[in-house]
Image (spheres, rainbow, N blue to C red):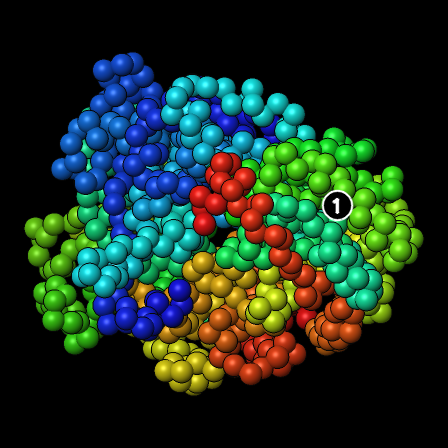
Amino acid sequence: MAAAAAGAGSGAWAAQEKQFPPALLSFFIYNPRFGPREGEEENKILFYHPNEVEKNEKIRNVGLCEAIVQFTRTFSPSKPAKSLHTQKNRQFFNEPEENFWMVMVVRNPIIEKQSKDGKPIIEYQEEELLDKVYSSVLQQCYSMYKLFNGTFLKAMEDGGVKLLKERLEKFFHRYLQTLHLQSCDLLDIFGGISFFPLDKMTYLKIQSFINRMEESLNIVKYTAFLYNDQLIWSGLEQDDMRILYKYLTTSLFPRHIEPELAGRDSPIRAEMPGNLQHYGRFLTGPLNLNDPDAKCRFPKIFVNTDDTYEELHLIVYKVTTIFPSHPTLDFCRRLDSIVGPQLTVLASDICEQFNINKRMSGSEKEPQFKFIYFNHMNLAEKSTVHMRKTPSVSLTSVHPDLMKILGDINSDFTRVDEDEEIIVKAMSDYWVVGKKSDRRELYVILNQKNANLIEVNEEVKKLCATQFNNIFFLD
Amino acid sequence: MEAGGDTAALAPGGTEDLEDTQFTSEETREGEGVHAVPPDPKEEGLEETEDHKLVFLQQGPLLLVAMSRTPQSAAQLRGELLAVHAQIVSTLTRASVARIFAHKQNYDLRRLLAGSERTLDRLLDSVEQDPGALLLGAVRCVPLARPLRDALGALLRRCTAPGLALSVLAVGGRLITAAQERNVLAECRLDPADLQLLLDWVGAPAFAAGEAWAPVCLPRFNPDGFFYAYVARLDAMPVCLLLLGTQREAFHAMAACRRLVEDGMHALGAMRALGEAASFSNASSASAPAYSVQAVGAPGLRHFLYKPLDIPDHHRQLPQFTSPELEAPYSREEERQRLSDLYHRLHARLHSTSRPLRLIYHVAEKETLLAWVTSKFELYTCLSPLVTKAGAILVVTKLLRWVKKEEDRLFIRYPPKYSTPPAASTDQAAHNGLFTGL
C-alpha cells in the first residue's frame, strides 16, 4: 500500500496505475421530526448536496441513514451511529442539535489499474481513511456554520424551516467547496491553535494596549490578537476561538496577502488611499475610511451560544481582530486613529521577537526534528511537518501514510486516560514515536533506517530537552 | 459474545428488513463486509470507553452479524464471523446450505444446527480467552520431545485404512501430531483453520467417551463435500485419535486402525509421557499440556505468542505457534480478555492493509507490549510495565534464543505424509463429491 501510494507499483501495473484521493460524494442535513408520516419524507431534508440528485434518491439516502441510526440505537441508546463503512464509501453521522442530523459521504480512495486486456480494474481502498479525521471535519462544518449563523434552533425561532433552509443553502453551498478531503489529517482532529511565543515584556505591552483600547471603545466586547497566522491573546471562549481561528487562517487571511506577495489569481484589494501615519488597515469593513458613504458591512458572528448567545460583528483590523456590536463608520475612524499608530509600534516589537525566534529554531526549510505537538488544555498546536497553509491545501513534508499512522496512534491514545507511549517502525523503515502525558500529545517522525529502539529513544529525548524541557513525558 | 441461532443465521424476516434499504446489497459484493460504528457511553466500572462495532458479512444466502464492544478491528470481527460460518459449513456443507435456501427462501436453519450452539459459543469464547489460533492462523502443538513425536508420526503413518485421508492425535485441544494422505491432500495443504476446527470439534463434550462416527466437512479444503470421521479417546485418557476418511462404511476398518495405534503407543511408552504432560497445567479451562513462561528464564516477560515463519517450504504444511500458559496477573477472566484485546489491537496494526508496520512498542499503565514481525517470525510479547527499553530488548533476545533452542520440542518440524492404497479409495469417494473441488 505504501508503495502504491508513492506511485511505485510493480511489474506490469507500474506505468498504468492511477490513484484517486478521497472525495466528497454527498452532504446532507435532515430532521426526521419534520416528516414523520408516509408521503412527507421530503420535508425532512433541510439541505442536500449535490442538489441535482433525483428527489426519490435523496429520500432513500436520508431514509437509510435514519434506519442505521435507529438500528444502532438499540445497542447504544444514548449515542447512536458515528460512521458506516462500505466498500465504496464511508458515511459520517453527526447530531449537533437534538434531532438535527448532518451526514457526510466520502468516497474511499481508489486505485485504478489496467488489466492485461486493457480494461480498467477499480480497487477501493476501504481501510485507508481514518474515521476520526472525517468525523472531526464534519463537526467543524457545524461549528463554522454556527459561527456565522447561530444555531439551527435559533433559525427556526427566527423564521421557521424556510429561514433555516435558506441559511443552510447559502452557507454550505460555498463552504463545501472549500473542503479538501484529501489533505485532512491529524490536525483536523486536534483543531488546535498555533500560538506565537512572546517574551514577557512584549506580551504585557500587548495586554495593556488591548485593555486601553477596549476601555476607550466600549462597544468592543472581545479582542483577539494575532501575528501572521499565530495567536498571541484572545478574550473569547476556547471553542469559539478555535473555530474562528480556523476561519481566519484558512479563509480570511489568505485572501488578504500583501499585494506584493499575492499570487496571480488572488483578488487584490484596492489600496486604501491614504493614512500614511501607520500600517493598519481593515480586512473586514470599510475600504475607504474617508468616504462618508462607505458601506460598513462586517460579518456577523455568534459566540457563547451555550449561555449568553451573543451576536457580534467581526472587525479584522490587521493585525488585530476585534469584536464589537453595532459598529459604524464613525467607530471605524476612531478605531483607526486610536489603534493604528500604537499597533504599528507594537508590530515592530513583535517582528523583532519573530526574528529572534526564527534564528533560534533554525531554518524553516528542513527542521531538525519532524514533530507534531498538541496540548488539549489550551489547544496549543505546533507542527514542523506541515508547511505554510495555502488557502486550498495544507502540505506536509512526510508521506501521507505516516500521517495516517499518527492518526492511528492518536486513536490508541484516546482509548485510555493514562499516560502512554507508542513507538512503531513502519514498513518504509521510518520510526514514529507517540507520547502522551497529561493532556499533551507529541508525535515525532524519524527517518533512521538502521536505528534500534534505544537510539530512537535517545533522539526523542534530545528533542524533548530542547523544545519541551519543562514538560514531563514518559521515558 | 452470544452465539447460536441469532448470529449464525437470521430468522426469516431479519434479512428482509435490510433488503428494503437497497444500498446494503448494492454496495457490498459477495462476501464483503459492512460495518457501522456507534460510540459507547461511559459506563460505571468500565475504565476504557470503547466504541461499539457492528459488522455485517454475507456468505451465500446467509447474513452474519457481529456486534462487539471490544477493540477488535472490523477485519478481525469479520474473521470471527467467517469462523462461525466455517463451523456451520463443517456441519452442513456449503452446497447443502445453498440448496436448502434455493429451494425454500425462509427456511429456519436453526433446525439443522441444533446442538452446535455450544460449539459456536466455545469457538467465540476461545477468541477471547486464547486468541492465538484465530489471530495467527496457526495451530498450537503440545511440547513433546522430538524422538517421541517422530515415533508417533511414524506410527500414524503405518496404521492406515482404505480411504483414510488424515490421522490426528490430540490432547486437550492441542495437536500431538498429524499425518496426511499424500494423494488426497497433495494438491491442497490442510488449512490450519480446518485443523483447528477439528481440534475444537473433538474437544466437545459429545466426544467425551468411547468412540464416535460422524460426517464432517472441512470448509477451506472442500466446502461442498464430507469426510467421515472416527473419533476415539485412547485408554480413557484425554488423548484423542481422529481418523478422517472418505468412505462411509469404513467404521470397522477405522476401529481396527485405532487398536493398532493404541498398541503402538503402549509399546512406545507414549501414554505415560503424554499423561505427565497432560497433568502439568491445573488451569481449569483446558487440561492442556503447556509450559510456564518462567521456563524462558527472562524476568519481566509475562506472556508471548511466537509464530515461526521460516519453516522449510516443502514442509510448510502446518503454520504453528507457541505460547505459554497464562499466569498471574492474567489468571482472572477479565484480565485474559483484556490481554487478548491488546493482542488483537497489535495484530490489527501490524497487518493493516493500508499501512502495515514492522514493530510496535507500547508502554501502557498495566503492561508494556512489544509486537514484531520479520521474515523469520511473528512475535507478540507482554512485559512488565516498568521495563526499560534496554531491558525489553534483553528480554526479547533471551526469548528468541530460548525458542530457537526448544524448537524441536515446541513445533512439529516435519509433519509426516503417507499413501493409502489408491484403488479402494477413489471409486467410493466419488459419490460424496469429495473430489469435486480438486
A167 vs B319, nearest the viewer: B319
A447 vs A340, nearest the viewer: A447
Q: Position of residue A175 (x, y in %)?
A: 24, 48
> As displayed, is residue A462 above or below residue B194?
below
Residue name at image x 45 percent, y 34 percent: B95
Q: Is residue A400 left or right of residue B380?
A: left
How many numbered discs sit on the rendered protein? 1
> As displayed, is residue B124 above or below residue A33?
below
Q: Is residue B233 left or right of residue A111?
A: right
B194 vs A308, nearest the viewer: B194
Q: Position of residue A407 (x, y in %)?
A: 47, 58
Residue name at image x 46 percent, y 74 percent: A428
Q: Position of residue B231 (x, y in %)?
A: 73, 39
The reply to whether residue A173 is visible in this rendering is: yes
Residue name at image x 42 percent, y 78 percent: A353
The reply to whether residue A340 is visible in this rendering is: no
Q: Position of residue A243 (x, y in %)?
A: 37, 51
Which quadrant is the N terminus of chain A positioned in?
bottom left
Amino acid type of the residue that numbered disc 1 sits on in the rendered structure: Cys
In the figure, residue B212 lies in which quadrant?
top right
Which quadrant is the C terminus of chain A positioned in?
bottom right
Q: Is residue A350 left or right of residue B212?
A: left
Secondary structure of the residue carrying tag 1 is helix
Residue name at image x 62 percent, y 53 percent: B420
- The residue sitting at the front extreme is B423
Q: Chain of mark 1?
A: B
Q: Is residue B305 left or right of residue A19?
A: right
Q: Which residue is mark 1?
A: B257
A224 vs B376, nearest the viewer: B376
In the figure, residue A6 lies in which quadrant?
bottom left
Label 1 crowd bin: few (<14), some (14–19), many (20+), radius 10 Å:
some
